[in-house]
Each structure stands twice: as structure tokens, then as C-alpha cells.
Image (spheres, grey):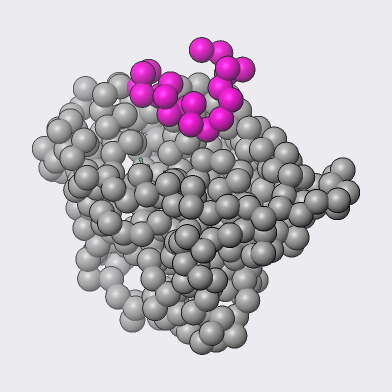
Amino acid sequence: PPLSEILNLHDFEAIARQVMTKNAWAYYSSAADDEITNRENHAAYHRIWFRPRVMRDVTTVDFSTHILGHPTKMPIYITAAALGKLGHPDGELNLTKAAAKHGVIQMIPTLASCAFDEMVDAAVPGQVQFYQLYVNKDRNITKKLVQHAEARGIKGLFITVDAPQLGRREKDMRMKFTDDEPHAQKGDAGVDRSQGAARAISTFIDPGLSWKDLDWFRSITRMPLILKGVQCWEDALEAYDRGLAGVVLSNHGGRQLDFARSGIEVLVEVTRELKARRGLSFPNEKFQLFVDGGVRRATDVIKAVALGATAVGIGRPFLYAFSSYGYEGVDHALNILHEEFTMNMRLIGARNLGEIVPEMVDASNIGSH
Ligand code: FNR
């Protein structure tokens, strides 16, 4: 169908399921075990309701903000996802281009199909990009990646901490990642392809990563450090106490531990406990909270912002968008979000993100804040 018939982010998934190769669909859509967390990620937003304000002159609304000090036109970013070329020959470059046009930030994955430098070279002057890091058992490789990223102007290092071992994604495993994919990354020789794409590419990840490694990261880079994949207030507090710039409350799109809670549910306990224990209020510039997983509507994002998130990461919808329509698909997805923000900010009575306060949501069904 023409893009004009794509009315929301869910629509891209339905199209992608039909047009993508079986392997690519299996890799992008799969989640761990029984995929309960994957479903819960979106469902959790259904338990939060709005308490809108009226009579506020919402003629103009502005939903721009800053992430780690860098401007973004919406409180979202394009999160990291591996193997972009499985879905489209231009892979992650579709995201780089669309991010530039819409003034949003792209998080470049360690396991991108495109070369890192290609994605940085494709950015327009001033375009901000972050880097998602899988920590290699060989720290020299990690050091090179990190220092190269910093040298190329990357503004934030998101260290993935929820994947000491790749989750069991059975849809993907059944596909037996093979070389007959037209756009698939060939990968290094010697990888085990019998376990699906995810496992084939992830054997280098170090399960030995621990809190004490953070000092080492500090010694090799001045980029702000953010942990991606924190899932309870105790770890968020530890990250804060250790001086990190923030955490992403995420379960990796339900692809790691099944029965992990949704990021939005974790957000509620994190803001509550960090307020009680350290007197912090959110959103907070010094220690920023991000959420990802299951975000499909601007109303989802607005709920996360109301509950203290600085911004929200979106993954699969953009993958499905470029797999179905290339760059134009991602462009359209971002246009849809922009229109949804304008309308829903008006309807809840907020002219800017600062006016989206906790009182504008009833989150009592997912925890007390
Ligand atoms: C991911 N995600 C991910 N995260 C990460 O830190 N490194 C990675 O290489 C990948 N790769 C990846 C591939 C695919 C196909 C998906 C769907 C996801 C997780 C991603 O950053 C994010 O946490 C989730 O995608 C958010 O959930 P939604 O928006 O996809 O529901």
C-alpha cells in the first residue's frame, strides 16, 4: 500500500510482516522465550491513563528538548538495533538520513550492518549521534571502538548491560541464519550460524562485565556513560552513585530475560526511590532516565515524560518502516509521531514538555509514584 495509507506506527509492522524475508522478519520481530515481556512492553502503557488539563491556550505547542545536553525536536531517539541490512540494502543509513531531517538523535549500534564511519560520514554537520556498545572480551577491541567513536564526534556511550548472553529467540533460531539472504551481513568466518542471526553475531560479548569496569571506561573516554538495560531501582541508584550520566530502563525489546518488567513500570519505582534516597527530581539534567520497549504512539512517550523520562527510545517501528519503504518509511514514521505529539499535547493541555507533569497521568495501576 502507498505510504499515505500508513496511519500509525503499528501499520508498519503489519506491512513488514508481509514484505520482509522470513529470516529478516524472524530476527527483527523475535523476542525471548514465550515473548511475554515483548507483549507486556506495549501493554504496560495501556494501564496508564491521562488526567488532561483544559483552557490553556494550546495554539502552539513545542515538544523539543535536550538529551545529554543536545537538542532534539521530539523527546524520542532512534535506538540501536543490529543488522539493518537484513531489512533493506541501505540498512542503518536510512535512519541516519531520517534522523537528520527530523532533528532527532540516532544511536549507532556496535553490530550495525553499515560501517560505523559510513553512518558518521552520512550525518549532516551538527547532527548528533550516540553509540551503543557491546563490550568485547578483548578490551583492546572495545577501547579502539570507543576511542574511535569519540574521535568521530559521538556524544554519548550507551553500554548495553542486559545481554551477558543473548536471550533465547526461538523464532530466530528456527531460521538457522544462512548466507542466502540478499542483504545479510556476511559476518566473520567461524561464527556459529546454526542458532539464528542473533547468536551468530554475539559470541564476543563479555559476560564478565561488572561495575568495577566503569573506572576503566572513564580512563579511556570523556564521553558521557549511560547504562542501557537497567531494570530495577537498585541498579539505577548504583549508576547514579557512580556518577554516570544516566540509564536506559529497558529489557532490550523483550529479547533478553522473559518476564522482565516493562521499562515504563521500572521508571515509576526508579523515580520514587531516587527521590526518597537521594532527593532527586525528574526529568533531571545531571542524571537522565530513558525508557524503551513497546513505544508506538506519542501518547506512550508523553506518559513516560510525565513520569520523569528525559526521552524514549524507539526500535522496531523504524526497522519495519525502512524494511517496507526504505528512507521514506522512516521519514513517514517520524512525521506521524510529530503529528501525534502536536495533537496529544493540545489534548492534555501541555504547551511544552515542562508542562507534562506527573499529575497528568494516573499510573496507579503500575505502581505508586
Ligand atoms: C535490538 N536491540 C538492541 N539493543 C542493543 O543494545 N544492541 C543491539 O545490537 C540491539 N539489537 C537489536 C536488534 C533488533 C532487531 C531489535 C528489535 C532490538 C534492542 C533495542 O535497542 C531496544 O531496546 C528495543 O528495540 C526497544 O523495543 P522496541 O521499540 O523495539 O519495542
x then y, percent, for residue 75: 63, 52
**Which portion, as a residue range, is magenta?**
1-20
What is the magenta segment's predominant secondary structure?
helix
Q: Position of residue 33 (x, y in %)?
A: 20, 47
Residue shown at 51% from the left, 87% from the top: 277
Q: Is residue 216 left or right of residue 314?
A: left
Q: Say which of 147 and 209 sits in front.
A: 209
Vertical relation: 5 (above or below) 255? above
Pinpoint residue 331: horizontal percent, then vertical percent.
61, 30
Left/right placement of residue 264 relative to residue 56 reads left
The residue shown at (51%, 12%) is 1
Q: Is residue 218 at least partly visible in the picture?
A: no
Q: Is residue 135 visible?
A: yes
Q: How many marks?
A: 0
Tell me, yes or no, whether the highlighted magenta stretch contains residue 17. yes
Q: Residue furthest top?
A: 1
Q: Is residue 217 magenta?
A: no
Residue at the image position 44 percent from the left and 46 percent from the top: 42
Judge left or right: residue 308 versus residue 250.
right
Residue 22 x/y as whole percent: 26, 24
* Left or right of residue 235: residue 198: left
Picture residue at 42% right of the left edge, 47% below the top = 43
